[in-house]
Amino acid sequence: MSDKEVVERKLRVLMVEDNQDRVDNCKVIARNCRCNIVWAKSAGMAIGMLRRDSGRVYDGIMIDHDLQDQKITSNDGNFNGKDVAMAVIRYVDKDVPIFVHSSNSTEAPKIATLLTGAGFSVERMRWCDVKTRDMRDWFGFVRAAAIP
């Protein structure tokens, strides 16, 4: 098989986000970058997925902090992006890139610092500042870090 015949596998990126429009916008960009977005619409859902899919199931993880719009269970109101970050530290391989895309200017830096301190490569931007180019660049970084 020649280099031209090698097809890049589609990457799996977990997006922890409670806003459907943001997820839909991200999916369009991800599709063009040969990435598949797996959506966790609440912190509790994300924590359960990370516990179940430990290790290197996801090639990248995107985390919002404020996750109150899509409560799946009554406990979801008690969780936020910091709880998701703690689950990432506990269940995910350190070589999985993380993108903290929260507009919460107080808590997002804390999440990024927590994850960086645990050995993860972290990109942090407020969602309102994220441009298509930024997403494409991050998906490219995820692809470079991915296991073939």
Image: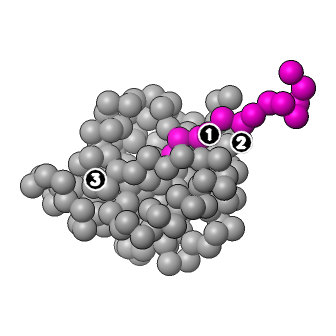
| Magenta stretch, residue numbers | 1-13
Give the residue at x 61% y 61%.
29
Q: Nearer the viewer, residue 4 or 65?
A: 4
Residue type, mark 3 in image: Ala
The residue under label 2 is 144
Q: What's under tag 2, amino acid-wise?
A: Ala
- Quarter occupied by the C terminus: top right
Judging from the image, what secondary structure is the residue with disc 2 in? Answer: helix
Q: How far apart, in angstroms, are the residues tagged by discs 1 and 2? A: 13 Å
- How far apart marks 2 and 3 lie (CA) works out to 27 Å
List x then y, in percent, for residue 78: 16, 57
Count the marks: how many? 3
Does residue 2 show up magenta in the picture? Answer: yes
**Residue 43 got which mark?**
3
> Can residue 112 be found in the magenta stretch?
no
- Rendering coords of residue 50 (x, y %): 35, 37
Q: Residue at x 29, y 43 (%)?
A: 47
Q: Residue at x 37, y 66 (%)?
A: 20
